[in-house]
């Protein structure tokens, strides 16, 4: 039986009583899914998982995405990880050495330090992400999570009514540009594989019915809104939604497994001194379908 220790009443819980290297009982699988729905972020310590096992556990939540690294920007070079379903969240190259400052894999991953939700730049975005920590720096390198349900609940009703019908444009390369990636030099083939996509700005959770803001640094514009107005609105919402009262900061321990629901949270890496190694891998579950039909 799993035991939950909530960090706050309905955001973030630590999970005990589970060994993910053995098959989950149907009861535990059900309890884990229910806990995800309630808390949106789960921390499961002491889970040393092989790549295969991580993939298998993540599949409890649905089919997995193929990582953008494996399918787009690093598709034709060796990868450190053996599964295309696993995103390489590390500062390491394919032989395990620390990446050079100018390495494209490092530059692409830098955008993880901006508030975002995973894969909102895909037409069918991500539901659950599952990040496993292999090596962590002695200082720094935390990950912060923000509760977009609480942020939505805290907006006044006039603002909620204004936001509810809006559609945002999410662009993978927009967030890369914000962290200094040379977006002018991006091959046309990459842009074609990862074109801008529309997403609703306000989501309703499939399991709980709770509404939440759906924000990310991937947002380049709001549909049918002037650029400056749209930028101002997104900046304002970002600042509002990431106030400390909505945020949990996770300090990693080796073999922590952290799961979050991308449909109703944002997260960002806090940065660290890159002379240290930091090695994580992420499995990402695909949501049921696009948030915008037309
Ligand atoms: C991710 C991510 C942030 C971090 O794995 O999706 O954004 O702290 N990670 O590495
Ligand atoms: Mn992420």
Image (cartoon, grey):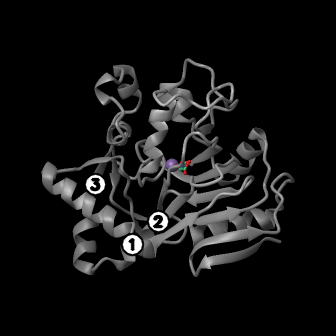
Find disc 3 in the rendering and name its residue: 167
Where residue 246 sits, quadrant-wise, is bottom left
Q: Residue at x 39, y 66 (%)?
A: 242
Q: Residue at x 79, y 42 (%)?
A: 50
Dot 2: element: strand
Mark 3 crowd level (few <14, some 14–19, many ≥20, 10 Å Cα): many
Q: Relative to 61, is 217 on the left or the right?
A: left
Mark 2 crowd level (few <14, some 14–19, many ≥20, 10 Å Cα): many
Viewer-proximal residue, 61 or 253? 253
Quick check: 100 above or below 91?
above
Quick check: 77 above or below 281?
above
Mark 1 crowd level (few <14, some 14–19, many ≥20, 10 Å Cα): many
Residue 146, labelled with which disc? 2
Quick check: 277 above or below 45?
above
Find disc 1 in the rendering and name its residue: 151
Dot 3: element: strand
Q: Nearer the viewer, mark 1 or mark 3?
A: 1
* Residue 121, position as x, y percentages in the image: 40, 43
């Amino acid at each position: 039986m799993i035991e939950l220790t909530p960090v706050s009443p309905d955001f973030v819980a630590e999970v005990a009583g589970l060994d993910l290297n053995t098959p989950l009982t149907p009861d535990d699988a059900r309890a884990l899914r229910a806990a995800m729905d309630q808390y949106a972020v789960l921390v499961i310590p002491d889970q040393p998982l092989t790549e295969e096992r991580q993939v298998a556990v993540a599949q409890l939540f649905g089919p997995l995405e193929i990582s953008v690294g494996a399918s787009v920007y690093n598709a034709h070079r060796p990868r450190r990880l053996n599964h295309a379903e696993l995103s390489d969240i590390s500062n390491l190259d394919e032989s395990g050495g620390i990446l050079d400052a100018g390495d494209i894999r490092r530059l692409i991953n830098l955008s993880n330090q901006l508030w975002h939700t995973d894969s909102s730049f895909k037409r069918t975005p991500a539901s659950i992400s599952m990040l496993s920590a292999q090596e962590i720096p002695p200082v720094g390198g935390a990950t912060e999570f923000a509760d977009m349900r609480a942020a939505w609940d805290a907006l006044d009703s006039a603002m909620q009514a204004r936001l509810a019908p809006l559609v945002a444009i999410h662009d993978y390369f927009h967030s890369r540009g914000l962290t200094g990636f040379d977006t002018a030099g991006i091959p046309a083939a990459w842009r074609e594989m990862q074109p801008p996509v529309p997403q609703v700005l306000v989501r309703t959770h499939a399991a709980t019915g709770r509404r939440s803001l759906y924000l990310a640094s991937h947002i380049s514009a709001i549909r049918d809104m002037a650029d400056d107005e749209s930028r101002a609105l997104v900046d304002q919402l970002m600042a509002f939604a990431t106030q400390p009262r909505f945020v949990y900061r996770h300090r990693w321990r080796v073999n922590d497994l952290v799961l979050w629901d991308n449909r109703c949270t944002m997260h960002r890496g806090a940065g660290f001194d890159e002379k240290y190694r930091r090695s994580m891998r992420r499995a990402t579950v695909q949501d049921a379908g696009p948030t915008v039909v037309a």
